Amino acid sequence: MSVRFQNIQVQQFVERFKTDSTMLRSRVGTIRPVNEFLDLKRVSKPKNMNDVQKRVTYNLAYFSANYLIIFAMLSVYSLLKNMLLLFVLVFVSASLYGINYLNGADLNLGVVRLTTSQLYVGLLVIALPLGLLASPFSTLLWLLGASCVTIIGHAALMDKPIESAFSEEAV
């Protein structure tokens, strides 16, 4: 019965991976070229707040994949600037993988025998103070602020292409 349960889990994982990979391929297909994303000819000051709203709405949809890449790059940058947070994330991930690798069995170190629940509590006792010391909240707030300023700033300053203006008039 355990083998059947594991086969079902593997099948569900494979199906989810197929779904996620097709979604990723479709998202990668919508990445706009750099020369279009950084087209200085289309950068202009918006006339009023209504114009800003229209530009942001249009550009967030049009450049969504590019903005996702910017967010990912800023995330990597923030983790590289906060090495303690990166260490804590890697440590917790590796520890959780190691505990799950035991499949509920006890960890026998010769002198000490630790249960799975003791390992989880030990991980919590070590990771929680380290995690708070790593200041994840300030890193997250910096990431959100930098992303919003960069993405909304680009979306507000980048004018719609001329083709889109003609397509709106035809409607």
Image (cartoon, rainbow, N blue to C red):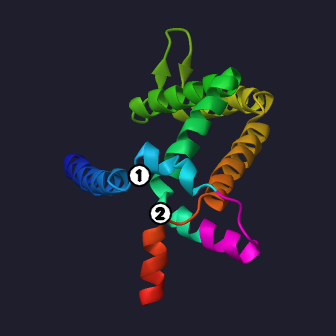
SS assignment at label 1: loop
Q: Report helix, strand or loop for mark 2.
A: helix
Q: Position of residue 171 (x, y in %)?
A: 43, 90
Q: Horizontal and vertical percent for residue 101?
A: 40, 30
Residue shown at the point (40%, 51%) measured from the top left: 31
The span from disc 1 to disc 2 (Cα, nearest Å) is 8 Å
The residue positioned 25% from the left and 53% from the top of the image is 18
Circles 1 and 2 in contact, beta carbons < 8 Å: yes
Q: Is residue 89 above or below residue 149?
A: above
Q: Is residue 97 above or below residue 69?
A: above
Location of residue 70 (image quadrant): top right
Residue 62 circle label: 2
- What amino acid is found at the position of numbered circle 2 in the picture? Tyr
Establish if 165 lies above or below 10.
below
Q: 10 Å neighbourhood of mark 1: few (<14), some, or many (≥20)?
A: some
Disc 1 designates what residue?
32
Q: Main secondary structure of the magenta part?
A: helix
Bounds of the magenta segment: 44-56
Taking the spot 54% from the left edge, 63% from the top edge, the residue there is: 59
